[in-house]
Amino acid sequence: MYLVGSGFSQGEVKWLSNEVEWRLILTTTQLPIVVTVTSSLCRGRCAILDDQLARLSETYGSLIILRKVNILTNPFFKILYNLANAPVIIVFQTGKEIGRLVDDLSWGAITDIIE
Protein backbone atom coordinates (compact mmCIF):
# COMPACT_ATOMS: atom_id res chain seq x y z
CA MET A 1 0.00 0.00 0.00
CA TYR A 2 1.22 3.49 -0.75
CA LEU A 3 0.71 6.38 1.59
CA VAL A 4 0.78 10.01 0.51
CA GLY A 5 4.03 11.69 1.55
CA SER A 6 4.75 15.34 2.16
CA GLY A 7 8.43 16.12 2.69
CA PHE A 8 10.20 13.23 0.99
CA SER A 9 9.21 10.87 -1.78
CA GLN A 10 6.28 8.63 -1.06
CA GLY A 11 6.95 5.83 1.42
CA GLU A 12 5.73 2.31 0.88
CA VAL A 13 4.46 -0.02 3.59
CA LYS A 14 4.64 -3.71 2.72
CA TRP A 15 3.63 -6.83 4.59
CA LEU A 16 6.37 -9.35 5.34
CA SER A 17 5.28 -12.71 4.03
CA ASN A 18 8.10 -15.12 4.86
CA GLU A 19 11.47 -15.54 6.54
CA VAL A 20 13.47 -15.71 3.29
CA GLU A 21 12.10 -12.35 2.19
CA TRP A 22 12.84 -10.87 5.63
CA ARG A 23 16.44 -12.10 5.72
CA LEU A 24 17.03 -10.68 2.23
CA ILE A 25 15.72 -7.24 3.25
CA LEU A 26 17.65 -7.32 6.52
CA THR A 27 20.98 -8.18 4.90
CA THR A 28 20.84 -6.05 1.75
CA THR A 29 19.62 -2.62 2.83
CA GLN A 30 21.55 0.22 4.40
CA LEU A 31 18.43 2.19 5.34
CA PRO A 32 16.80 1.89 8.75
CA ILE A 33 14.01 -0.71 8.73
CA VAL A 34 10.93 -0.11 10.87
CA VAL A 35 8.84 -3.22 11.45
CA THR A 36 5.44 -2.99 13.06
CA VAL A 37 4.41 -6.26 14.62
CA THR A 38 0.68 -6.79 14.59
CA SER A 39 -1.92 -9.48 15.10
CA SER A 40 -5.54 -9.87 14.12
CA LEU A 41 -6.26 -10.17 17.86
CA CYS A 42 -4.87 -6.80 18.99
CA ARG A 43 -7.44 -4.55 17.27
CA GLY A 44 -7.42 -1.06 18.90
CA ARG A 45 -3.74 -0.79 19.77
CA CYS A 46 -2.78 -2.10 16.34
CA ALA A 47 -5.04 0.52 14.73
CA ILE A 48 -2.93 3.16 16.50
CA LEU A 49 0.11 1.53 14.94
CA ASP A 50 -1.43 1.93 11.47
CA ASP A 51 -1.82 5.65 12.11
CA GLN A 52 1.83 5.87 13.19
CA LEU A 53 2.92 4.00 10.04
CA ALA A 54 1.07 6.49 7.86
CA ARG A 55 2.74 9.34 9.71
CA LEU A 56 6.18 7.70 9.40
CA SER A 57 5.64 7.31 5.67
CA GLU A 58 4.68 10.97 5.31
CA THR A 59 7.56 12.20 7.46
CA TYR A 60 10.45 9.97 6.37
CA GLY A 61 9.34 8.83 2.90
CA SER A 62 12.06 6.88 1.15
CA LEU A 63 14.61 7.46 3.94
CA ILE A 64 13.39 4.37 5.83
CA ILE A 65 11.94 0.99 4.92
CA LEU A 66 8.54 0.27 6.44
CA ARG A 67 7.27 -3.27 6.97
CA LYS A 68 4.38 -4.88 8.82
CA VAL A 69 4.20 -8.46 10.02
CA ASN A 70 1.28 -10.38 11.46
CA ILE A 71 2.73 -12.79 14.03
CA LEU A 72 -0.28 -15.10 13.82
CA THR A 73 0.14 -15.76 10.11
CA ASN A 74 3.96 -15.43 10.14
CA PRO A 75 5.15 -17.01 13.40
CA PHE A 76 8.77 -17.04 12.18
CA PHE A 77 9.09 -13.38 13.22
CA LYS A 78 7.67 -14.05 16.67
CA ILE A 79 10.20 -16.84 17.18
CA LEU A 80 13.19 -14.93 15.74
CA TYR A 81 12.66 -11.91 17.97
CA ASN A 82 11.13 -13.56 21.04
CA LEU A 83 7.83 -11.69 20.86
CA ALA A 84 5.06 -12.45 23.32
CA ASN A 85 2.36 -10.19 21.92
CA ALA A 86 1.48 -7.30 19.62
CA PRO A 87 1.70 -4.45 18.91
CA VAL A 88 5.44 -3.90 18.89
CA ILE A 89 7.68 -1.64 16.83
CA ILE A 90 11.22 -2.85 16.11
CA VAL A 91 13.86 -0.77 14.32
CA PHE A 92 16.82 -2.38 12.54
CA GLN A 93 19.98 -0.81 11.14
CA THR A 94 22.72 -2.66 9.24
CA GLY A 95 21.10 -6.00 9.99
CA LYS A 96 20.80 -5.54 13.75
CA GLU A 97 17.98 -4.55 16.08
CA ILE A 98 18.67 -1.06 17.43
CA GLY A 99 15.41 -0.38 19.24
CA ARG A 100 12.12 -1.88 20.33
CA LEU A 101 8.92 -0.28 21.59
CA VAL A 102 6.33 -2.37 23.39
CA ASP A 103 4.33 -0.13 25.68
CA ASP A 104 5.04 3.41 24.51
CA LEU A 105 3.96 3.64 20.88
CA SER A 106 3.83 7.44 20.92
CA TRP A 107 5.18 9.49 18.04
CA GLY A 108 8.03 10.86 20.17
CA ALA A 109 9.16 7.40 21.26
CA ILE A 110 9.10 6.14 17.67
CA THR A 111 11.12 9.04 16.26
CA ASP A 112 13.61 8.79 19.14
CA ILE A 113 14.65 5.27 18.14
CA ILE A 114 14.69 6.05 14.40
CA GLU A 115 16.87 9.12 14.74
Image: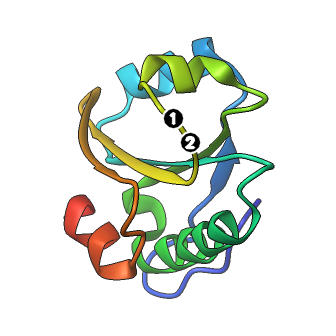
**Can you tell which quarter of the image residue 13 is in?**
bottom right
Which label was assigned to residue 97? Answer: none
Identify which residue is drawn at 60% across, 15% down. 19
Query: If the image is split into quadrants, where does the N terminus sit?
Result: bottom right
Instruction: Decide which of 107, 40 is in the foreground and name it.
Output: 40
Query: Residue under circle 1?
Result: 84
Residue 34: percent from left, percent from top: 43, 50
Marks 1 and 2 sit apart, C-alpha to C-alpha, by 4 Å
Taking the spot 37% from the left edge, 20% from the top edge, the residue there is 27
Instruction: Point out residue 72 in the picture as x, y percentages from the top left corner.
Output: 75, 32
Q: Amino acid at mark 2?
A: Asn
Q: Nearer the viewer, residue 4 or 97?
A: 97
Residue under the point 57% across and 80% down: 5
Q: Is residue 50 above or below residue 78?
A: below
What percent of the width, then of the height, locates residue 48? Answer: 61, 75
Which part of the image, by quadrant, shows the C terminus?
bottom left
In the displayed structure, 104 sits above or below 6; it is above
